[in-house]
Amino acid sequence: MDEIKFEDFAKLDLRVATIKNAEEIPEADKLYKLTIDVGELGERTICAGIKQHYKKEDLIGKQIIIVANLAPRKMKGIESQGMLLAASSENHEEVVLLMPEREIKEGSCVS
């Protein structure tokens, strides 16, 4: 990967969000439609390719880290308004969500 400058990293708005709902997306093997609460930024919908690694009922109530200022993108006909952060093994067989160590207010900045 190319090296970036601090100014490039500073453009990212990383926030804490709580997953309020997780839904199946018809004909999507990898994606869930998540409704998340980002505090003062409001509720948002994001599509996340974590279906093979998490049961939807296990996601509800989890706090995650998102890129809040990512331009919206249509995925399977749904406008995804951000991206959650996850770590994966080299072959993507193991995927884990990045989460705060303990609960914190939705919308809190990550730096």
Image (cartoon, rainbow, N blue to C red):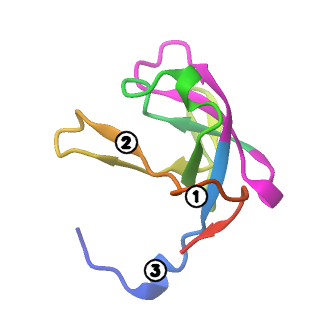
Is 21 covered by the magenta stretch? yes
Dividing the picture into quadrants, the one containing residue 73 is top right
- Residue 107 position, x and y percent, is 71, 60
Per the rendering, the mark at residue 70 is 1
Per the rendering, the mark at residue 8 is 3
Query: Closer to the camera: disc 2 or disc 3?
Result: 2
Q: Which residues are magenta?
A: 19-43
Determine whether 55 is above or below 84 in the image: above
Mark 3: amino acid: Asp
Mark 2: amino acid: Val
Assess whether mark 3 and mark 1 are in contact (beta carbons under 8 angstroms). Answer: no
**Mark 1 vs mark 2: which is more N-terminal?**
1
Is disc 1 placed on a helix, strand or loop? loop
Decide: few, some or many residues near mark 3? Use Cα within 10 Å; few <14, some 14-19, many ≥20: few
Per the rendering, the mark at residue 96 is 2
Mark 1: amino acid: Leu
Is disc 2 placed on a helix, strand or loop? strand
In the image shown, does 23 or 11 lie closer to the viewer? 23
Is 30 covered by the magenta stretch? yes
